[in-house]
């Protein structure tokens, strides 16, 4: 019985730690955007204009993107930031390739950018990534570390209780 209780507690702690992970929303719901065919140019200002055009009438919970932008090559991304990925056309893609817009709904300490696009417009390799945020990337607030520490403390307390 003691082992079953300890197993249930471990599972609960792991489930709480998993809930601390961030959610990323593709602003289109899926796929990519043919920016070239819609008259946009490949600039941060054009990408921001595109993101702003998606806000009215969306059903994905999109928020107004921050206006500060920087090239993204890895690192922390804050909740509310947008990341626009530009993929080359590749075999079967449109001439300009495609943009993928991602909204981060929680802070992440890093994000693994896919090397190739999934289409339907950009199947080629990554040719650029622009982060729209307040200009300062912030690391995870430590919630995962705190939850892990609390879980370890709970396990230590259970070990002492069942050992006696």
Image: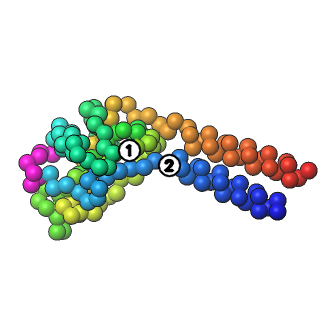
Question: Which comes sooner in the sequence, label 2 or label 1?
Answer: 2
Q: Say which mark, if any, is on residue 21.
A: 2
Circle 1 crowding by C-alpha within 10 Å: few under 14, some 14–19, many from 20: some
Give residue 40's position: percent from left, percent from top. Answer: 11, 46
For residue 2, side relative to residue 99 (left or right): right
Q: Say which mark, if any, is on residue 12.
A: none
Residue 74 is one of the magenta-drawn residues: no
Q: CA distance from mark 2 to mark 1?
A: 11 Å
Q: Residue at x 41, y 38 (%)?
A: 78
74 or 135, nearer to the observer: 135
Helix, strand or loop status at disc 1? strand
Q: Which residue is mark 1?
A: 104
98 or 105, nearer to the observer: 105
Query: In this orientation, does residue 1 appear?
Result: yes
Give, as a single range, the part of the protein colored magenta: 36-43
Give residue 107's position: percent from left, percent from top. Answer: 45, 40
Looking at the rendering, which quadrant does residue 8 occupy? bottom right
Circle 2 crowding by C-alpha within 10 Å: few under 14, some 14–19, many from 20: few
Residue 37 is one of the magenta-drawn residues: yes
Outermost residue toward the right in this view: 164
48 or 136, nearer to the observer: 48
Outermost residue toward the bottom in this view: 92
Helix, strand or loop status at disc 2? loop
Give residue 64's position: percent from left, percent from top. Answer: 28, 36
Q: Residue at x 21, y 64 (%)?
A: 120
Query: In this orientation, does residue 88 appear?
Result: no
């Amino acid at each position: 019985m003691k082992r079953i209780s300890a197993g249930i507690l471990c599972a609960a702690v792991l489930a709480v730690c998993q809930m601390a992970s961030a959610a990323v929303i593709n602003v289109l719901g899926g796929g990519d955007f043919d920016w070239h065919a819609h008259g946009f140019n490949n600039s941060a200002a054009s990408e921001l204009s595109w993101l702003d055009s998606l806000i009215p009438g969306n059903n994905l919970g999109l928020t107004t993107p921050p206006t500060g932008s920087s090239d993204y090559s890895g690192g922390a991304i804050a909740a509310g930031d947008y990341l626009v990925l530009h993929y080359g056309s590749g075999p079967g893609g449109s001439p300009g390739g495609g943009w993928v817009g991602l909204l981060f709904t929680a802070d992440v300490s890093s994000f693994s950018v896919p090397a190739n696009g999934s289409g339907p417009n950009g199947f080629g390799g990554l040719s650029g990534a622009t982060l729209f945020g307040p200009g300062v990337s912030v690391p995870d607030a430590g919630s995962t570390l705190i939850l892990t520490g609390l879980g370890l403390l709970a396990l230590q307390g259970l070990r002492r209780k069942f050992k006696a």
